Image (cartoon, rainbow, N blue to C red):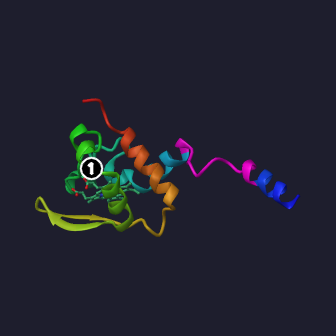
Amino acid sequence: MARLIALLLLTALPAAAELPDKKVERLWKAKCSACHGADGRGQTPTGKKLKLPDFTRPAWQAKTTDELIRNRVMNGVLETRDGVEKEMPAFKDELQPEHLDAIIALIRKLAVAP
Ligand code: HEC
């Protein structure tokens, strides 16, 4: 009986941690868009100053692995390149793994057709 109840409880839970699109979009707008732009092109004042990559470009999408995105977002960035100090905060204390997966999916959706 207890087993049956446990089974019923389990199946009643929402399907594995997928965030609704609206929530991910809010997360992106709140934490990322100030630098990367709502559209991911990096054309904000900060984005231009830091010479941020354009996430909508097919070439950027192709060369950028999910692993790299994960790593950068979790650990942040701090390096001098292209004559600017590129600094991005680490988000590992703020984002749950399912948030990160959802953000990666959102970044992939920013891609424009070649
Ligand atoms: C304070 C500005 C700032 C904020 C806020 C910010 N970033 Fe960044 N981000 C940067 C900088 C600077 C880099 C390094 C860019 C480079 O390598 O040219 C970067 C790099 C990245 C990269 C790797 C790009 C590449 O080609 O290597 C990803 C992916 C990324 N950011 C995603 C995010 C996400 C997702 C968020 C929100 C959770 C976020 N960033 C918030 C400034 C920011």
Instruction: Using residue 42 as the reference point, say whether residue 25 is left or right of it.
Output: right
- The answer to whether mark 1 is within 8 Å of ligand 1 is yes
Instruction: Using residue 99 as the reference point, say whether residue 63 is left or right of it.
Output: left
- Dividing the picture into quadrants, the one containing residue 58 is top left
Q: Position of residue 38 (x, y in %)?
A: 38, 44
Q: Which residue corresponds to mark 1?
A: 64
The amino acid sitting under disc 1 is Thr
Q: Position of residue 37 (x, y in %)?
A: 34, 46
Residue extent of the magenta highlight:
10-22
> Is 14 or 82 nearer to us in this picture?
14
Q: Specify the quarter for ligand 1.
A: bottom left
Q: Say which residue appears at 71% left-offset and 51% top-offset.
A: 13
Q: Say which residue appears at 23% left-offset and 52% top-offset.
A: 52
Q: Position of residue 90 (x, y in %)?
A: 37, 67
Q: Say which residue appears at 26% left-offset and 52% top-offset.
A: 47
Looking at the image, is 46 positioned above or below residue 40? Answer: below
> Is 21 or 33 nearer to us in this picture?
21
Instruction: Using residue 3 as the reference point, say whether residue 51 is left or right of it.
Output: left
Farthest residue, direction left: 83
